[in-house]
Amino acid sequence: MNIPDRYHGVWQRTLLETPTERDTTTWVRWLQTGLWHGDLRVPAAADRNTVAGRAKLQGFGGTTLITQPDAAQPEVCTWQRQIDLQPPRSTPDEGHMVFESPEVVHETGIHGTYFEVWERLPGSLGTRIALAALDDQGAPTAERLLVAGRYLMHLRPRRAAWPVDTTADDSLAEVVARHPQQAEALLDFDISFGTLEHGVWTIERATSPAWEDGVRACTMHRMGHAEATVKCDGLTLHWQVLEWHAPD
């Protein structure tokens, strides 16, 4: 079931407050279609040319659920993570959401003490597309391509499994430190975000800095109710349509 229209678009986090931190410098984008989300968070001090810096990044994707279990409390947004750069969490990713205006929403933690301010980026409404990459046998994979307005996000999970000693709420940095020989496999996770306009994808931020500021010809065509093709360097050709809302 699709979530309310007021959540659609791309949201930039402008403030994070916790009991020990005030953060206004981490680059954060949350892209939300009618059901699917993608999220990328790049700390300003993270050197993505190093293993330690790449391990500090956060990013995930999946479906989104909006509920209001208590009428006396604000509604709850739950980000149901299907892929995650960081190890699994012990608690759901959900927060109470209050819209201060149509373009600004405040999030307050439910399973942790934090407060976040999100502002919707101009030009992120209208088109909403969610695609799942198909493998060589035509089966859908966990790789996603999401579009909201003029913005596109690509998410490809790592192929490696977590080491057997990984526990809930470990950080990626901790896992990599314990298994340095597996660092590259554990860090082999792509999230790339940028604008898609006139058939050109300009990447603003990515888990790999080598992808940034790159310009790629990128077009997508719906081939039927359930299939689409994507012609873009570095991406597979055949995709399953999970969601396609593209007004003229």
Image (cartoon, grey):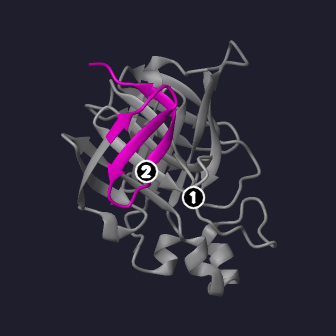
Nearest the eye: 238 or 187: 238
Which quarter of the rendering shows the N terminus? top right
User: In this view of the protein, can residue 13 be seen by the observer?
Assistant: no
Image position of 168 (left or right of 146) = right
Q: Position of residue 160 (x, y in %)?
A: 66, 69
Residue 193 versus residue 146 in the image, above or below? below
Check disc 1 and report its element: helix, strand or loop.
loop
Residue 233 image label: none
Instruction: Answer few, some or many: residues within 10 Å of disc 2's Cα (few below 14, many 20 plus, some between 14 and 19).
Output: some
Q: Position of residue 187 (x, y in %)?
A: 55, 71
Q: What residue type is labelled 1?
A: Pro
- Measured in 3D between alpha carbons, the distance from the residue under mark 2 to the one under mark 1, in whole angstroms, is 10 Å
Which quarter of the rendering shows the C terminus? top left
Q: Mark 2 points at which residue?
A: 154
Q: Where is residue 183 in the image (x, y as percent from the top left)?
A: 59, 80
Is residue 228 part of the magenta span, yes or no? yes
Q: Position of residue 161 (x, y in %)?
A: 71, 67
User: Which region shows up in magenta?
Assistant: 220-248
Residue 157 image label: 1
Is residue 144 part of the magenta span, yes or no? no
Residue furthest to the bottom: 181
Q: Which residue is drawn at 54% across and 29% down?
A: 35
